[in-house]
Image (cartoon, rainbow, N blue to C red):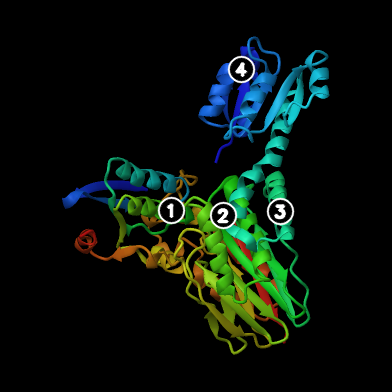
Amino acid sequence: MNVEITIAKKNISILHIEGKILGNASDAFRKEMSEQLQTGRDKLVVDLMNVPLIDSSALGAIVITLKSCQQSGGKLVLLNPQKAVREVLEVTKLSTVIEIYDREEDACNAFF
Amino acid sequence: MTETILIVDDDLDILELLKMNLEPEGYNVRTANNGESAVQSACANPPDLILLDVMMPQKSGFEVIEELKNIEHTKNVPIILVTARGQTEDKVLGLDTGADDYITKPFDLREVTARVEAVLGRTRPIKYINPLMRAMGDKFSEEGLQQLAGHLQAAAAIQNKLLPEQAPSLEEFDIETLLQSSTSVSGDFYDFIPLNETQIGLVLGDVKGNGIPAALLMVMIRTALRLLCHEEDTPASILKRVNDLVVRDTEADLFATMVYGILDIANSTFTYSNGGHCYPFHWKHTGEMGVLKTEGMLIGAFEEATFSSDICELSPGDILVFYTDGITETETRKSEVTAGNTSQKEEEDSSENGLPITESHYGTDRLATCIAKNVGLSASALCDAIVNDLTLFSGSTNPHDDRALIIIKRDI
């Protein structure tokens, strides 16, 4: 798994993830997100376009980061999850508590 | 969550020896070489256990205990005294020291490890029981509490050896179960709970998270279900109660997914609710493959989670298959995919090797196909057929993730 982070306007962090988020990668994924929070960035867009699969620890990472963001008044949104990932989000009903967008522009507008 | 042990001894060699012995067991070890710094260290950040030498200059082990027992947040920290044979041993035996156990010097390192584990095993559940009691409130009967304490004790002591209940043997229904653990502590679980003469509660779930907290969460959920299923009427209200219980007392990244349902033998119905778990299959005798789909969020992460119940009828020949994602996320054999590649053991992203992503994992479609092909078999033979197909697909009999299955077939 690779992570590339870009900072969009209004201090929104966009995390472009590439590869499966399984096992140890989930820890790295969680760390990347928490580093954003630690530097005061609590507006996160997680770009899942190039993520074929995630496991339950990755879900856990999303849940805990989402909660941290909300606590500090920010938000975490997901961008463009692919079929397998989308299914996991649907089945666990995380899709009802996390905003999911198909376009980066919409994802960024979600914060205002 | 790693447990921390504070070792206190004025002999630096012994400190080092114990540290070297306990760290490989997975404990986080802190040391102090006198009584004063032991008290400071314990107060600053209470450890899970203290190994405390009795004979130390200035402040003895006895004095350290006395101080710690008078401080609110250290008074419950378990303590094992380390005494010199013949000298302090007699004294320790004759005194109510407040310690949980003692070891005599010179000691056998294996004995130290065993005693540490035994004391932690006894005291570990207490940390979890208190918040649980609060959460359950007055709904918790004395009997239920004892039952819970017993379950948690058992879980902490033997962690993963908590065997699932036997599948009940019923007239008209053929039931088979499977539980394969990939690690020492399994996250998948199932249980059968007799409710009355004609109804059986059934749960299959998956605790996400690792180690002891996850193992304890599993036991907590199983126990809560066993208590609540007699109080609440609908599977949805039971899952809601379990969710509320778990959400208050666990970290946000510790949660579970599960299906809970009531099999009614007299009416041949299954009433169920789903907490974020993969939808069970319902193969109907008409040849149609359906899923048991209700809305419900994963358990234990969100206070606002809601659940719904639904009911299905089971005609003769109908089959229900409950499974965990360890089945559908089984990965394909690497050797086929990366033929000629020498780094087969590397965890590679399968999208890079040209294989379509959908085929790198077993998936629900293949599971459905496998079930549909083998509907004529008994529950047990169908279970074997699924396991064989998984082995064929993955090229390995060792699962990477936990796998659990429950198959229920109504006799024709």
Q: Which quarter of the rendered picture does the C terminus of chain B lie within? A: bottom right
The span from disc 1 to disc 2 (Cα, nearest Å) is 15 Å
Name the secondary structure under disc 4: helix
Amino acid type indicated by mark 4: Gly
Q: Which residue is mark 4?
A: B35
Same chain, marks 1 and 2?
no
Q: Which quarter of the rendered picture does the N terminus of chain B lie within? A: top right
The location of residue A18, given as percent across then percent down, is 33, 52
Amino acid type indicated by mark 1: Ala
Mark 4 or mark 2, which has the lower sequence index?
A: 4
Query: At 65% from the left edge and 9% from the top edge, which residue is drawn?
Result: B57
The span from disc 4 to disc 2 (Cα, nearest Å) is 46 Å
Q: What is the number of the mark on residue B401?
A: 2
- Of marks 1 and 4, the one in the foreground: 4
Residue B197: image quadrant is: bottom right
Q: Which residue is mark 3?
A: B151
The location of residue B120, given as percent across then percent down, is 67, 37
Badge 2: how crowded within 10 Å, few (<14), some, or many (20+)?
many
Q: Which residue is mark 1?
A: A58
The span from disc 2 to disc 3 (Cα, nearest Å) is 25 Å
Same chain, marks 3 and 4?
yes
